[in-house]
Image (cartoon, rainbow, N blue to C red):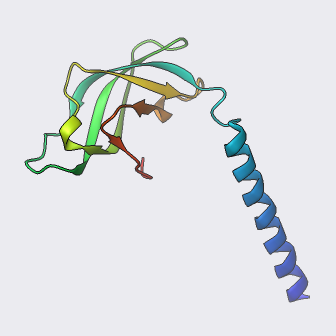
Amino acid sequence: MLEVVMAVALVTMLVVTIAALVSGRTGRGRANLEHGSLYVTGVSPLPAMTGEHYVTITGTVTGPSITGKVVYRRFAWDAAHWPAPGDHLAVAYPPHNPDDWHAEHPGLRPYLGS
């Protein structure tokens, strides 16, 4: 009996994983994103060393369905392209949750945290 339960659980996990991969490839998860602008009001200090470092950015997102939403997020960022207060960054976010914004910038590096 335990073998049957384990087999069903494994098959279920496999189906969920395949569905997540397929929906990611078709772009369904990103099709409904809105594009806007982030006005940077605060940023972590520029590190003394070059290379990739963590930065926390605070700012105000403005887009088609929102105006002036204050947000922040932590990124891995290339120090050679460090952001500064007053910068405008292109961002994308779900219309129902602008706090889940993602920047588009040459200094941005992949980071799995939030």
Residue at x 45% of width, y 52% of height: 112
What residue is drawn where x is 42% and y is 46%?
A: 114
92 lies left or right of 7: left
Q: Position of residue 35 (x, y in %)?
A: 51, 20
Q: Residue 97 at what x, y percent from top left? A: 55, 29
| Left or right placement of residue 97 versus residue 54 in this view | right
Q: Quadrant of residue 106?
A: top left
The residue lying at 70 percent from left, 52 percent from top is: 21
Location of residue 8 with respect to 43 vertically, above or below: below
Q: Nearer the viewer, residue 25 or 58?
A: 25
Q: Is residue 27 left or right of residue 91?
A: right
Q: How many marks?
A: 0
Q: Position of residue 33 (x, y in %)?
A: 59, 26
Q: Residue at x 59, y 23 (%)?
A: 95
Relative to 73, does residue 14 appear above or below in the rendering? below
Image coordinates for residue 101, horizontal then vertical, percent: 47, 32
- Quadrant housing residue 57: top left
Quarter of the rendering containing residue 68: top left
Q: For this rendering, which residue is in front, 90 or 38?
A: 90
> Looking at the picture, does residue 72 appear above or below residue 12?
above
Q: Quadrant of the N terminus?
A: bottom right
The residue nearer to you, when weighing 62 against 76, is 76
